[in-house]
Image (cartoon, rainbow, N blue to C red):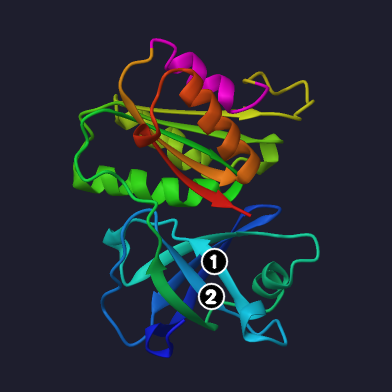
Amino acid sequence: MKNENWREAKVIKIAELTADVKHFWLQVKDSNFFDFKPGQYVVLDLPIGDFQKDRFRSYSIASPPSTNPVFEIVVMRGNGGNASDYLFNEVKEGSLLRFNGALGSFLLQEKIDNDICFICTGTGIAPVRSMFKHLIDKGTPKKNVFIFFGTQYLKDVMFREELEAIQKSFPHFTYKFVLSKEESTYYKGTKGYVHQLYEKEFANKREADFYLCGWREMVQEACERLKAMGYLTKDIHQEVYE
């Protein structure tokens, strides 16, 4: 990556989204503007490896462009992951992080002609949140917008209160989550996998644009299922997390 593209951002706030996910607010240093598009990501240069390539980690931006020069990322704790260990244990409010970006082509269509269905798992909800909040900033979406989120346990659901509150205010917005391993008796919601949510909603095969973000296996399976339903490659936009 070119040196002239690197900038610094100050961590101005850190919150715990779940026991294993932290939410970071970063303010670009020495600038009042950070140009990015919803769905893009930044690359952090972290002091965690012996070689330069080992230092780079990519994180999707979780906030809309209207918040610039502040942007948000969410980080999941990894099992033995050097980057997440550093961000969880060493970075504090006031810390400076070196970053490059914004980068990436996982973007909203410029013209919204169809229903929009966001399908995400884990921290794949980050760029979806950026896109969705940008749609709200532009004005109440005239087409139906769906966010279908899948994870394992109720404790792992991110941004639930925020999205449920937004759902009450926007009649064209539907938010649903599904849990694959939750065994508690007090949970009465949907169990299973995220695929069952969009397959049920779009069983009539109406025109829609699908935005998929999460682990590779989920994204690949969702692509196959959507194509089996009759949707074309041009209807499906994706971002894979390794």
For mark 1, does the 10 Å Cα neighbourhood hold few (<14), some (14 to 19), or many (20 or more) residues? some
Spatial separation of the CA atoms under disc 2 and disc 1: 6 Å
Answer yes or no: is residue 168 visible: yes
User: Bounds of the magenta span?
Assistant: 191-204
Question: Which quadrant of the structure image shows residue 205?
Answer: top left
The residue shown at (19%, 40%) is 111
Q: Residue furthest top?
A: 204
Nearer to me, 121 or 141: 121
Q: Tell me residue 189's x, y (percent).
A: 62, 20
Q: What residue type is labelled 1?
A: Ser
Q: Tell me residue 233's x, y (percent).
A: 40, 34
The residue shown at (42%, 47%) is 129
Question: Which quadrant of the structure image shows residue 210?
Answer: top left
Nearer to me, 54 or 47: 54
* Residue 36 within the magenta-colored segment of the rendering: no
- Do residues under tags 2 and 1 come within 8 Å of each other at their CB atoms? yes
Q: Tell me residue 153's x, y (percent).
A: 71, 36
Which type of secondary structure does the marked residue at label 2 adopt? strand
Answer yes or no: is residue 91 visible: no
Q: What residue type is labelled 2?
A: Leu
- Determine which residue is flagged by label 1: 58
Which type of secondary structure does the marked residue at label 1 adopt? strand
* Up/down of 145 relative to 90, above or below: above
- Quick one: quadrant of the C terminus? bottom right
Residue 98, numbered circle: none
138 sits to left or right of 92: left
202 sits to left or right of 56: left
- Determine which residue is flagged by label 2: 44
136 sits to left or right of 132: left
The residue shown at (46%, 17%) is 229
* Up/down of 206 relative to 53, above or below: above
* Up/down of 81 relative to 95, above or below: above
